[in-house]
Amino acid sequence: MRLIADKFEQDYGIPVQIETPEKITDNFPLAAQAGKGPDIVIWAHDKVGEWADGGIIAPIEVTAAYKEQFYPMAWDAVRHRRQLWGYPISLKAIGLIYNKKPVNGALPTQLSDLILFHKKLKSEHPDMNSILWDYSSPYYSWASWLAAAVIFLEKQPMDTILATSEWRRREQSRDYLRSST
């Protein structure tokens, strides 16, 4: 970051002060509303909507040529109410990696395909599991929940959930994996 600030100072003659304040998500909105906020804030995209709606960040205009330098999904992360509110500087995704040595044949393309895949893998390698992740962290499990298409019914108690057939298959896969390890 310092190298970028130094280049900016050299090119434009404007001094740059870099700070890493504590509790930025709490303190930035207060400072910005008082007119004492920083010119640039680097933070995850999860605050874009809140800060945009609160009037503490301004939308930006970006040329088509500049946009083409990034994956479209990166721009989606900083888009709110059809406007861009920041520049993407990184893109992260949870990846699935696997050990090619014990896997013969095609990989499952659906979570529900894991039952057969797991049975085959266990028969050939009894000490292995077909899939693992940090189940206690919503960061790693959220995609499964989202992909499951769980529908909360309006006008029903919050504990009433209508699950799709894919969700049921996923639940069966999860139960099977737990029971066979």
Image (spheres, rainbow, N blue to C red):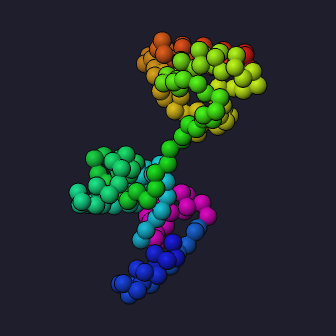
Answer whether residue 89 is magenta in the image: no
Furthest-left residue in this view: 64
- The relative height of residue 10 versus residue 179 in the rendered view (above or below) is below
125 vs 32, left or right, is right
Q: Is residue 20 visible in this depiction of the protein?
A: yes
Is 30 covered by the magenta stretch? yes
Q: What residue is drawn where x is 58% and y is 68%?
A: 20
Residue 103 drawn above or below residue 60? above
Residue sitting nearer the eye, 101 or 64: 101
* Residue located 56% across and 37% down the image: 96
Q: 165 left or right of 78?
A: right
Task: Choose between 20 and 89: the one closer to the eye.
Answer: 89
State the image quarter where residue 132 is shown.
top right
Viewer can see residue 34: no
Name the one closer to the observer, 66 or 79: 66
Quadrant of the rendered structure where residue 138 is? Answer: top right
User: Where does the image place residue 42, in percent across and percent down from the top left?
Assistant: 48, 62
The percent coordinates of residue 77 (x first, y second) are 40, 48
Residue drawn where x is 54% and y is 18% of the image: 113
Q: Position of residue 35 (x, y in %)?
A: 42, 70
Question: Which quarter of the image is occupied by the C terminus?
Answer: top right
Magenta stretch in the rendered image: 22-38
Q: Which is nearer the eye, 59 or 68?
A: 68
